[in-house]
Image (spheres, grey):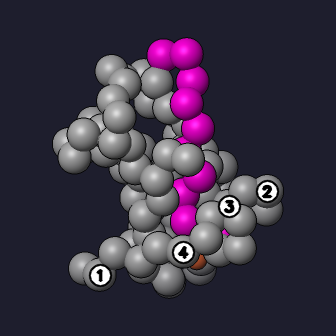
Amino acid sequence: MEVLTGNVKEEKHVPFVEELEEGYRVTVGKPAIHPMTEVHYVEFIELYVEGDLVGKKEFNPGDVPIAEFEVEKGKVVFARELCNLHGLWQGELE
Ligand SMILES: [Fe+2]
């Protein structure tokens, strides 16, 4: 599947990655959260550190598409999310 990306401030599908004390938080749609309706929703969020998949959270319609991962930190950090209508998107830790 093609991995899409863009400016996190302009494109609500790009995962927004923040550093926490013990890991990372990933939000899909900042400041306006991505829709989570029956017909249009975020299916999952994945977190990659140093190129490895270190965490994955799945969602259902009605959930809030935010995931926190308690993981060992690294220098290269990005997240991916799958929207059921608009595909697979990637965003880096800023
Ligand atoms: Fe979408």
Q: Position of residue 84 (x, y in %)?
A: 46, 76
Picture residue at 55% right of the left edge, 47% below the top: 94
Picture residue at 34% right of the left edge, 42% below the top: 76
Q: Which residues are magenta?
A: 12-22
The residue tagged 3 is 29
Magenta stretch: includes residue 19? yes
Spatial CA span between label 1 and label 2: 25 Å
Bin the neighbour count of mark 4 within 10 Å (Cα to Cα): few under 14, some 14-19, many 20 and up. some
Picture residue at 63% right of the left edge, 64% below the top: 8
The numbered dot on residue 31 is 2
Spatial CA span between label 2 and label 3: 6 Å
Instruction: Between residue 23 and residue 64, name the one nearer to us.
Output: 23
Q: Secondary structure at mark 1?
A: loop
Left or right of residue 67: residue 29: right
Give the mark, 3 or 1, whose residue is nearer the N terminus. Answer: 1
Label 3 beta carbon within 8 A of ligand 1: no
Residue type, mark 4 in image? Gly
Ligand 1 occupies quarter:
bottom right
| Residue 41 appears in the figure | no
Give the vertical position of 30 relative to 22 (above or below).
below
Residue type, mark 1 in image? Glu
